[in-house]
Amino acid sequence: MDLFFYLGPIILMLLLLGFVTYAILFERKVIGWIQNRPGPNQVGPWGLFQTIADVAKLLLKEDIVPGKADRALFKLAPIIAFVPAFAILAVIPFTESWQFGDFAVGLLYYIAISSITIIGILTGAWASNNKYSLLGGMRSAAQMISYEIPLVLSVVGIVMTTGSLDLNDIVLAQKKVWFIVPQFLAFLIFLIASLAELNRTPFDLPEAESELVAGYHVEYTGFRFAFFMLAEYVYVFAMASLTTCLFLGGWLPLFGLTMIPGILWFLLKFSLVVFSLFWIRATMPRLRVDQLMQFAWKVLLPLSLLNIFLTAIFKEIPVLSSFY
């Protein structure tokens, strides 16, 4: 157990690096396929080494700190943005026995720790001493705080149904039916809000290249820029894993096919969620800032409160509560 305590994070980091490397390639391939073009296909067979070449280029680039930037905060910001993304993976149950930290309040831990990343983004934006960077950081702070409210409220219905914040308990409560069925409204709210939390299309306003020349990380180069990108794709991994646990039954089998290992079921559902995120990016246009904020406060927030109200009613009616 002590050996796993030290080796576990290293193994997880290696798996994450592998995921990020080929998730970026897969995303570019999917977008190319949807837009009827080949995507990366020159570096290595079928373009398999393209992302590796991109990462090597980033690591070899000069690390530039702007002359009027706050040097200490400028260097610290990417670390503040990345560490929470890695820390929240400790509570994700990949199977009933594969979990790095079994917390009784795992869902609460995930929500609380993931909120810290916004501090890293805002710190990097302010420390860069660049007006476009600061505007991108302010947009990001407003967006992530606004969409975090419906994101949290959307999972309250699941907590009410299971009576637990433990992700293991939430997964095991879906043996009868996956929560995507009785909590479909919550699933839609969670999916939309998670896209905004990840700063992904159509909610990628904080790094809108057409108006803010990449937003909050415009002054970052080399491996510090890579840290921001790494944090973004680690959050894709984490959010897809959390969606799988909350709404798709985690490692639980479909159609009673128990002969297939739980980890394969988890990976299959996880891959479907990741593909959906990439698919949405390839098809949806970017929203305006005013549309983005109004949608959070005037649409998602009332719907998330409505979902809590409906869940409470379903729980109190015996015929309906037996459906859970």
Image (cartoon, rainbow, N blue to C red):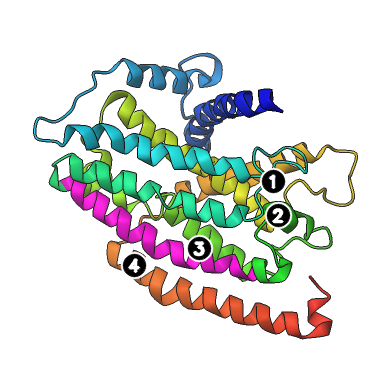
Q: Where is residue 247 in the image (x, y as percent from the top left)?
A: 67, 58
Determine the residue located farthest toward the left in the rendered image. Answer: 68
Report the amino acid beneath label 4.
Met
**C-alpha gap between disc 2 and disc 4:** 29 Å
Report whether 257 appears left or right of 199. right
Q: Residues within 10 Å of mark 1 (few under 14, many from 20)?
A: many
Q: Name the residue under label 2.
A: 248
Q: Residue at x 72, y 66 (%)?
A: 162
Which residue is the site of mark 3?
Answer: 151
Q: Residue 213 carries which label?
A: none
Q: What stretch is highlighted in magenta?
A: 132-157
Q: Which amino acid does label 2 sit on?
A: Leu
Residue 227 visible in image: yes
Q: Which label is found at residue 293?
A: 4
Q: Under tag 1, what secondary structure?
A: helix
Mark number, residue 269: 1
Cα–Cα gap, marks 2 and 3: 17 Å
- Sequence-wise, which precedes: disc 2 or disc 4? 2
Identified at 61% across, 82% down, the residue is 309
Q: Examine the rendered structure and indicate whether residue 269 appears above or below residue 263.
A: below
Lower position in the chain sequence, tag 4 or tag 1? 1
Label pair 1/2, CB-CB below 8 angstroms = yes
Q: Label 1 to label 2, Cα distance in Å?
A: 7 Å
Q: In which quarter of the image is the C terminus?
A: bottom right
